[in-house]
Image (tube, rainbow, N blue to C red):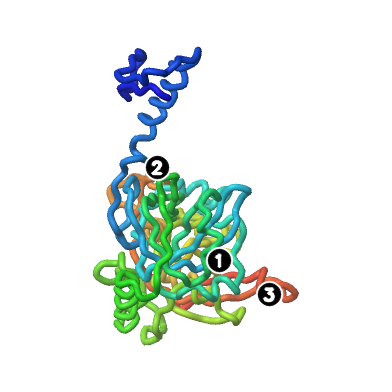
Amino acid sequence: MFASCCGKAKESFKAYQMSINYQASNNEKEVLSQLRTHFYDHKSDAVMKSCLLRLNSIKTETVFDLICRVLHVCEISDDQWMIYVWDGTDTPCAPCHKDLNAEGEDPLPLNLDIVPLSRKILHIFPCVGTVFRIVVRKYFEEIPQLRDGCWVKLCNLTCELHYGIWRGLLHGSSKVHILSDEDENVKSNMRDYQDRLASGARVQPLTCSPRHSYMTGTDFEKEPCVTLIKSLACHKVTHKFKSIVRVVAAYPWKGNHLRSPVHGHYRVRLTLEDSTVRIHAYIHGDDGVKFFGGHPEVEKLSTKMRRLLGIKENIGAEEAATSVRDPPWVCCCLKSYYLDKSDKWGSRRYRIFGTYILD
């Protein structure tokens, strides 16, 4: 037997309907008030409406459904899973606003993974399209049942940005539905992806409109571009490739700090990203001379770095480090190398070569 109330979040309590045999307990008001307040506070979860989106259309503060392929599932804590999903599109570019002056001691994160993914896992990830990370609480019984490669529909999903990297979240109101490969939405996603692969600009970021900025030139203009994740998953420790990327951070970044005060050699670490991953890439010695066009004056070097980082022209020197940046997409040549012969994979690094900034 129970009594029901008006359901509004206010101090008073007055039942509008009561069972004839109902016997009030001593704490009835407290219990019913807690239930009423709980409903009010969680009403948005109870009635949230979502729309079906692709990864290239996601937004923060938006509830949406996503049809995607599960690539990998792993445990990140006692009560959380991380699932890695993909739908063949690229997540939107996020503005950069981390303090450039702090890049030396507190660099921009390269990913959101608690434990670095192995090359074996990276090798199964598609080379085109963003692999989207989603945090899931362990009360979702469906998650351990998901097999790599299966298609799902995730309902009532939200997302957020961490240092410019997108991350999804499943909530208590979210649902997980396993789909057949014959589902019409799945077929539509795969057709769009095949069309992308068939096009000449398949590795061109979908958020790069209409093409990259042509701010840089390379010595290998006829070489095809690949995504950064393809390099990370490559079975060779050392190799060369060309990519379309954004420079989301640099250390150092000021024109008067780009060269060693002792020998005058260039030594810069750039944080590069495309729609698949982020990496650190270094510019050393003669590669720096080529990249920056010799040894120009500090003012010209500063201008080139500001253009690379997407700092607005009307921003003063003091504000530039913390301003919101929108780096252009640029093309560059990279090669991998290692620092320790006894630990080639663990000490692998990247450097930029054969690339120059156009005036």
Q: CA distance from mark 2 to mark 3?
A: 41 Å
Residue 79: percent from left, percent from top? 59, 47
Disc 1 element: loop
- In the picture, the quarter occupied by the N terminus is top left
Q: What residue appears at the point 53 percent right and 68 percent down from the top-left corner?
A: 147
- Kind of residue indicated by mark 1: His
- Foreground residue, 264 or 249? 249
Residue nearest the viewer, comparing 280 with 140: 140
SS at mark 3 in the image: loop
Nearer the observer: mark 3 or 1; the answer is 3
- Residue occupied by mark 3: 344
Q: Disc 2 and disc 1: Cα gap in Å?
A: 26 Å
User: Can residue 169 be seen in this snapshot?
Assistant: yes
Mark nearer the N terminus (2 vs 3): 2
**What residue is shown at x 30% (from left), y 59% (from top)?**
53
* In this view, 196 is above or below 134: below
- Considering only vertical position in the picture, is 94 above or below 68? above
Pair 2/1: label in front:
2
Residue 4 percent location from the top left of the image: 35, 23
User: Which residue is disc 2 drawn over?
Assistant: 318
Q: Farthest residue in the right direction?
A: 342
**Disc number for residue 265:** 1
Q: Are marks 2 and 3 in contact (CB under 8 Å)?
A: no
